[in-house]
Image (cartoon, rainbow, N blue to C red):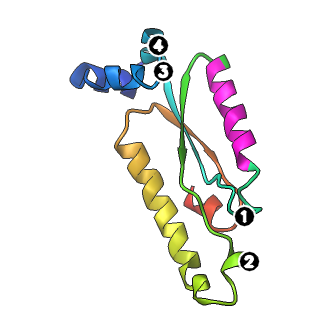
């Protein structure tokens, strides 16, 4: 199986010590690398519960022989944004989440992704 992460390692080995500096082991470097992207944030009820699912996804990746990395692109809550100018940023936040997820994916070396989201803007953004 050709893994994107391993192709990139052969071209840019300088990323290995950066990952080791974050607690990865040398063995982790050769495992399938999986991005776990979520809109977790403790800012509103639509996202406050998602960290539990992120951790379960990371555990599943590990049990399957991969190495997970967590990324977050927190959304906003229309209920909290209503009644003031904040609601004007509701749909724009969906585009920003989508853009940030694409940046996370394209700027890194992951072989696959797991996406954890809820709410009406975060799910389509993922």
Q: Earlier in the sequence, mark 2 or mark 3?
A: 3
Which residue in the protein does label 3 denote? 23
State if disc 3 and disc 2 touch (CB < 8 Å). Answer: no
The span from disc 2 to disc 3 (Cα, nearest Å) is 39 Å
Q: Could you tell whether 38 is left or right of 110 in the image?
A: right
State the image coordinates of residue 68 (x, y, percent, origin top left): 55, 29
Question: Whole-percent x and y of residue 58?
Answer: 64, 30
Residue drawn 38% across the image and 33% down it:
109
For the C terminus, the quadrant is bottom right
Q: Secondary structure at mark 2?
A: helix
Residue 44 got which mark?
1
Res 79 label: 2
Do the residues under discs 4 and 1 have CB atoms within 8 angstroms? Answer: no
Looking at the picture, how far across and down is residue 106, in whole percent?
36, 45
User: Which class describes the residues within 10 Å of circle 1: few (<14), some (14-19), or many (20+)?
Assistant: some
Of mark 1 and mark 2, the one earlier in the sequence is 1
Instruction: Give the distance between the C-alpha atoms of the residues marked 3 and 1, in whole angstroms.
Output: 31 Å
Q: In the rendered view, tell whether residue 41 sits above or below residue 80.
A: above
Within 10 Å of disc 3 (Cα), the crowding (few <14, some 14-19, many 20+) is: few
* Residue 43: image location, x then y, percent: 68, 62
Residue 62 versus residue 72 in the image, above or below: above
Q: Are marks 1 and 2 in contact (CB under 8 Å)?
A: yes
Q: Which residues are magenta?
A: 50-62
Q: Would you identify the image quadrant in which residue 100 lies?
A: bottom left
SS at mark 4 in the image: loop
Q: Earlier in the sequence, mark 4 or mark 2?
A: 4
Residue identified by numbered label 4: 25
């Amino acid at each position: 199986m050709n893994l994107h992460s391993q192709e990139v390692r052969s071209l840019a080995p300088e990323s290995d010590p950066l990952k080791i500096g974050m607690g990865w082991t040398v063995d982790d470097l050769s495992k399938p690398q999986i991005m776990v992207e979520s809109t977790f944030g403790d800012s509103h009820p639509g996202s406050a519960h998602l960290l539990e699912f992120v951790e379960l996804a990371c555990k599943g990746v590990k049990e399957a022989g991969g190495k997970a990395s967590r990324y977050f692109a927190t959304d906003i809550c229309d209920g909290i944004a209503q009644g003031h100018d904040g609601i004007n940023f509701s749909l724009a936040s969906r585009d920003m989440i989508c853009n940030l997820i694409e940046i996370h994916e394209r700027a890194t070396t992951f072989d696959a992704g797991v996406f954890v989201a809820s709410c009406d803007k975060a799910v389509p953004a993922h």
